[in-house]
Image (cartoon, rainbow, N blue to C red):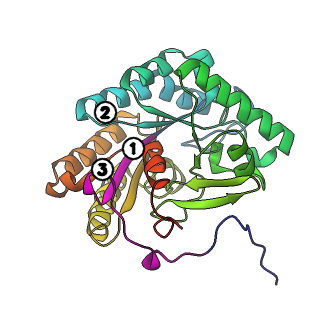
Amino acid sequence: MNLKKHNRYNYSPITERADFKWPGGKRLAFYVALNVEHFSFGEGLGHTPTAPGPQPDVRNFGWRDYGLRVGIWRIFDMMDELGLPMCHLLNASVCEEMPQIPARIAKRGDEVVGHGYTNSERQSDMDAATEAAMIRHATDTLAKHVGRRPFGWMGPWISETAVTPDLLQECGYTYLMDWPADDQPFWMKTRAGRILSVPYPIEINDTPTMLSRAQPATDFHRMIIDQFNEMLRLSKDQSLVFGISLHTFCSGQPFRLSQVRQALQTLLSHPGFETVWVTTPGQIADYAATLPADCVP
């Protein structure tokens, strides 16, 4: 069998890279990502905590809508109480129908990452022209409603076509989060230059954990703490990125929110947390772009 290759980046074992430190001499970069997703009614893709029903699947649509009507506001309040920033992986269609959400994001000063127009579609199902038009439309919509265009992107359902990194770089994006291949940023090749990959967690992520694998919220709590403790230990030798990914309709449920809050409080009270750079993917990308070539493969 001849293995196909993506030719976007070369193999680079993490043990062979030059050492570096994050701003302020920190060793572990930490961010919280909130997926803010909007879905078409009666058609297209959608998350579900139960068996999908025939369309219009009001049970599952309503559960997802709960995240935008209720869950996100409780997550906003929790993060305000904890004093933590967020980055928002934001479907652009949210801005058109729910202006209160981008307004709260702007008030908090949080970062916005492009996340397509809606999570009812995948980029991998689009031809190049359709995908390019969707990226431009989503970018323009976010810029209009948030006040600043995003420079980072993660595709709906973390999906790509063969040309997605090329289209993003040509649309002015400087980093993407679709490739969970590393604990450090790395450069990816495009047909017109390069784009940075910033680590995004698909393991420390509420929907794969609690919906796909049906693990309890207490497991997710434990995973967050175990990941932090181990990455804090590993970061003594190499600077790393530790992210937590949440979804409004999943972690916004009160019994799950309680477990997330307890986990974050544990992190904040850890004596080693003072060595952590609390940041966002955009700040990570901006800083990584200034590092010597032997630090960022």
The residue stretch that appears in magenta? 11-33
The numbered disc on residue 79 is 2
Secondary structure at badge 2 equals helix
Mark 3 or 1: in front is 3
Residues at discs 3 and 1 in contact (Cβ within 8 Å): no
In the rendered image, residue 15 lying in the magenta stretch gets the answer yes
* The C terminus, quarter of image: bottom right
Tell me if mark 2 has few (under 14), some (14-19) or many (20+) residues whose alpha carbon lies within 10 angstroms of its own.
some
Residue 155, position as x, y percentages in the image? 64, 44
Q: Which one is in front, 153 or 156?
A: 153
The numbered disc on residue 68 is none
Secondary structure at badge 3 equals strand
Residues at discs 2 and 1 in contact (Cβ within 8 Å): yes
- According to the image, label 1 marks what residue? 32
N-terminal-most mark, 3 or 2: 2
> Gap between marks 3 and 2, in whole Å?
17 Å
- According to the image, label 3 marks what residue? 277
- Residue appearing at x 32%, y 44% in the figure: 260
Q: Is residue 122 visible in this depiction of the protein?
A: no
- Residue appearing at x 58%, y 29% in the figure: 149
Tell me if mark 1 has few (under 14), some (14-19) or many (20+) residues whose alpha carbon lies within 10 angstroms of its own.
many
Three-letter amino acid code at disc 2? Answer: Met
On screen, residue 168 versus residue 226, left or right, reads right
Residue 255, position as x, y percentages in the image? 33, 38
In the rendered image, residue 110 lying in the magenta stretch gets the answer no
Q: Which one is in front, 218 or 282?
A: 282
> Gap between marks 2 and 1, in whole Å?
10 Å
Mark 3 or 2: in front is 3
N-terminal-most mark, 2 or 1: 1
N-terminal-most mark, 3 or 1: 1
> Gap between marks 3 and 1, in whole Å?
12 Å
- Residue appearing at x 35%, y 36% in the figure: 85
